[in-house]
Amino acid sequence: MSAPRMQVRCGVENCYYNKSGFCYADALEVNAMGDDIANSSDGTCCTTFIESMS
């Protein structure tokens, strides 16, 4: 397994792309939730997420 191009920490244990606490997705997309305006990190959502089946 090669290292990610940009180190993005991931705390979502059931994400397919999370390997040892880092995101290994080829691309990452983060969007605002709700009204498309985020006032804090709580108002954001990683739309790259895919649930791991293991």
Image: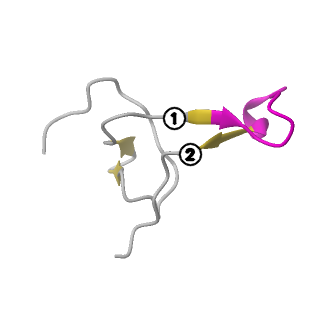
Q: Residue at x 48, y 46 (%)?
A: 48
Instruction: Say which of 48 and 16 sits in front.
Output: 48
Say if the magenta span includes residue 45.
Answer: no
Counting from the top left corner in percent of width and height, residue 4 is at: 26, 32
- In the picture, the disc for residue 29 is 1
The one nearer the camera, 39 or 32, is: 32
Determine contact: label 2, label 1, CB under 8 Å: yes
- Viewer-proximal residue among 29 and 7: 29
Q: Amino acid at mark 2?
A: Thr
Amino acid type at mark 1: Glu
Residue 35, position as x, y percentages in the image = 86, 36
For residue 52, side relative to residue 11 (left or right):
left
Q: Position of residue 13 (x, y in %)?
A: 47, 60
Q: In terms of secondary structure, where does tag 1 sit? A: loop
User: Over which residues does the magenta segment extend?
Assistant: 31-43
Q: Residue furthest bottom?
A: 54
Quote the CA–CA distance across marks 2 and 1. Answer: 6 Å
Residue linked to disc 2:
47
Identify the residue at image location x=44%, y=34%.
28
Q: Is residue 36 left or right of residue 15?
A: right
- In the rendered structure, which disc, 2 or 1, sits on the residue that comes first in sequence? 1
Q: Quadrant of the N terminus?
A: top left
